[in-house]
Image (tube, rainbow, N blue to C red):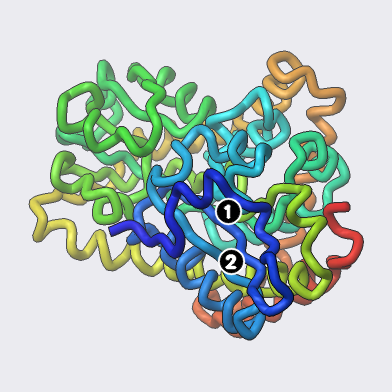
C-alpha cells in the first residue's frame, strides 16, 4: 500500500509548503517512485520523514508519495523544477540532456566496487563542486543528498553462466555505459523504466535486467526471473536521493534548512547500510523462491574488468562530443579526486558502525554547509 499523508489531488493543487497560520506546521510534498519496501524509499523517505518530524518538534512535515501516485518516473526532475513536488528522488539517466554532468560521472560507476564509499563521495562532490552547483541552479533545484545502489548484477529469465550465454539476449540497462558493455558481449540493450522491468521479463520483451539483487524482492522480480548472475557491474548513483524545488527551499527558515541537511546526512548512512544488508538477506532467500544464484565465470569477470578500464575515456569522450561540456576531463578528474579522498577517509572505518560513519560524513561534508547561504 502506498504511503500518503495527504491526497495526491491536494499536492497537485498544492501550496508551496508554508502553512497558512502561525501555529500550523510547514509541509513539504516528496515523491519517490520506488515501492515502499525498497530501501531508498523505506529509509530514505518514510523513515527520514519521521526523523524530520521529530527533529523539528512537529513543525516541519514531509508528505511522502511513493510509486507513481504523484509523478511518473521520468518526471521527477520536471515535476520538481515546476514545484509539483517539493522534494524528489531522481535517476539522472532518464534526463541526460538536462543533466549532462550527472550522466558523465555516472559512467564511471561500472568500474566502482563499493557502494557506501561511492554514495558519500557523490554527495560530497554534488554539494561542493562549482560545476555541479551551477547545474542545480540552472535546473532551479537544490541538491541535498546522494545515494548509490547495491552492486548491479544480471537478473535473468534464463540461465546465464558464461560470457557466450549473453550473446543474443535482450538486456534492460540503467544507462549508456552498461548498454555499451552489453553490446561488446553480443547482447542487445533495451531502454525501459525500472518500473517496467517485471512486465518486460514476464512477457519475454527482456531476457535480463542489469539491476540490483535487492529488486528480486522489492520489485518481486524473482517471480519472473529465476536466475541471478552475481557479475559485478558496479553501483548506480546517477541523479540524487534528495533534491528540492529551489524557490521552496529559499522560503524555508534557516532552522528548517538545517534540520533537512542534518537529517539527510544521517539518513544517507541509514539508507546505504540497510540497502546493502538487504542484499545478503535477499540472496539467501532467493533459492526458496526458485531462483538460482550463479557466480560469474572468469570470462564474464574479465570482460567487465577490461571494459571498466575504458569507462573513464568513454565518459570524457561522451562529455565532450555528446554533451558539449567545456571541460569533461576536468569534471572527471575532480570527481576522481573526491573518490580518492573518500577512499582514504574510509580506511579502517567499520562499515557496519553507523554512528562512526555518521560522524565521519557530517564532519567532512554536512557540518561545513552554511544553511543560510547554500542554495541561494
Residue at 74% over, 71% down: 256
Up/down of 11 relative to 284, above or below: above
Question: In which image quadrant can residue 198 be found?
Answer: top left
Q: Is residue 106 above or below residue 364?
A: above
Residue 288 position (above or below residue 330): below
327, 10: nearer the viewer: 10
Q: Which residue is mark 2?
A: 268
Q: Position of residue 99 (x, y in %)?
A: 68, 32
Rendered location of residue 89, percent (x, y): 55, 49
Quadrant of res 197: top left
Can residue 40 be seen here? The reply is: no
Residue pictured at 56% horizontal, 56% vertical: 29
Specify the quadrant of the image occupied by residue 217.
bottom left
Vertical placement of residue 74 versus 363, above or below: above
Quadrant including the N terminus: bottom left
Q: Give how far across and how far down residue 151 sits, in percent.
A: 43, 51
Seen from the viewer's position, the closer of residues 86 and 95 is: 86
Residue 59: % across, % down: 65, 78
Residue at image position (73%, 44%) is: 141
Is disc 1 surrounded by few (<14), some (14 to 19) or many (20+) residues within 10 Å? many
- Mark 2, Cα crowd under 10 Å, few <14 / some 14-19 / many 20+, is many
Residue placed most toward the observer, 183 or 14: 14
Residue under label 1, please give it: 241
Q: Which mark is residue 299?
A: none
Secondary structure of the residue carrying numbered label 1: strand
Q: Is residue 232 left or right of residue 224?
A: right
List the single residue furthest toward the right. Answer: 373
Pointers 1 and 2 in contact (C-beta within 8 Å): yes
Q: Earlier in the sequence, mark 1 or mark 2?
A: 1
Is residue 25 found left or right of 190 in the rendered image? right
Residue for point 23% across, 22% down? 205
Q: Secondary structure at mark 2?
A: helix
Amino acid at each position: 500500500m502506498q504511503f500518503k499523508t495527504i491526497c495526491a489531488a491536494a499536492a497537485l493543487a498544492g501550496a508551496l509548503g508554508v502553512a497558512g497560520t502561525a501555529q500550523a506546521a510547514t509541509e513539504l510534498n516528496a515523491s519517490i517512485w520506488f515501492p515502499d519496501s525498497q530501501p531508498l524509499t523505506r529509509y530514505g523517505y518514510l523513515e527520514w520523514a519521521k526523523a524530520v518530524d521529530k527533529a523539528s518538534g512537529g513543525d516541519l512535515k514531509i508528505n511522502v508519495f511513493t510509486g507513481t501516485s504523484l509523478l511518473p518516473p521520468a518526471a521527477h526532475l520536471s515535476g520538481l523544477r515546476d514545484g509539483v513536488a517539493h522534494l524528489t528522488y531522481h535517476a539522472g539517466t532518464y534526463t541526460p540532456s538536462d543533466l549532462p554532468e550527472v550522466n558523465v560521472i555516472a559512467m564511471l560507476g561500472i568500474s566502482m566496487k563499493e557502494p557506501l564509499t561511492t554514495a558519500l563521495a557523490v554527495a560530497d562532490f554534488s554539494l561542493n563542486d562549482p560545476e555541479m552547483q551551477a547545474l542545480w541552479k540552472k535546473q532551479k533545484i537544490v541538491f541535498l543528498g546522494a545515494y548509490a545502489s547495491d552492486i548491479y548484477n544480471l537478473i535473468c529469465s534464463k540461465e546465464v553462466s558464461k560470457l557466450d550465454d549473453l550473446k543474443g539476449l535482450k538486456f534492460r540497462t540503467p544507462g549508456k555505459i552498461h548498454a555499451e558493455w552489453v553490446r561488446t558481449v553480443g547482447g542487445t540493450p533495451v531502454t525501459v523504466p525500472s518500473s517496467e522491468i517485471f512486465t518486460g521479463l514476464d512477457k519475454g520483451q527482456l531476457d535480463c535486467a542489469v539491476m540490483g539483487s535487492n529488486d528480486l524482492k522489492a520489485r518481486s522480480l524473482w517471480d519472473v526471473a529465476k536466475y541471478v548472475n552475481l557479475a559485478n557491474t558496479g553501483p548506480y548513483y546517477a541523479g540524487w536521493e534528495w533534491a528540492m524545488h529551489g524557490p521552496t527551499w529559499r522560503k524555508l527558515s534557516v532552522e528548517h534548512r538545517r534540520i533537512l541537511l542534518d537529517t539527510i546526512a544521517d539518513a544517507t548512512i541509514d539508507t546505504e547500510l540497510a540497502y546493502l544488508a538487504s542484499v545478503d538477506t535477499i540472496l539467501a532467500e532467493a533459492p526458496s523462491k526458485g531462483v538460482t544464484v550463479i557466480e560469474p565465470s572468469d570470462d564474464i569477470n574479465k570482460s567487465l574488468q577490461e571494459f571498466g578500464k575504458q569507462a573513464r575515456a568513454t565518459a570524457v569522450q561522451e562529455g565532450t562530443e555528446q554533451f558539449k561540456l567545456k571541460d569533461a576531463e576536468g569534471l572527471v578528474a575532480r570527481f576522481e579526486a573526491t573518490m580518492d579522498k573518500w577512499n582514504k577517509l574510509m580506511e579502517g572505518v567499520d562499515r557496519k558502525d553507523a554512528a562512526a560513519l555518521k560522524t565521519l560524513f557530517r564532519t567532512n561534508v554536512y557540518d561545513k554547509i552554511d544553511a543560510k547561504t547554500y542554495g541561494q
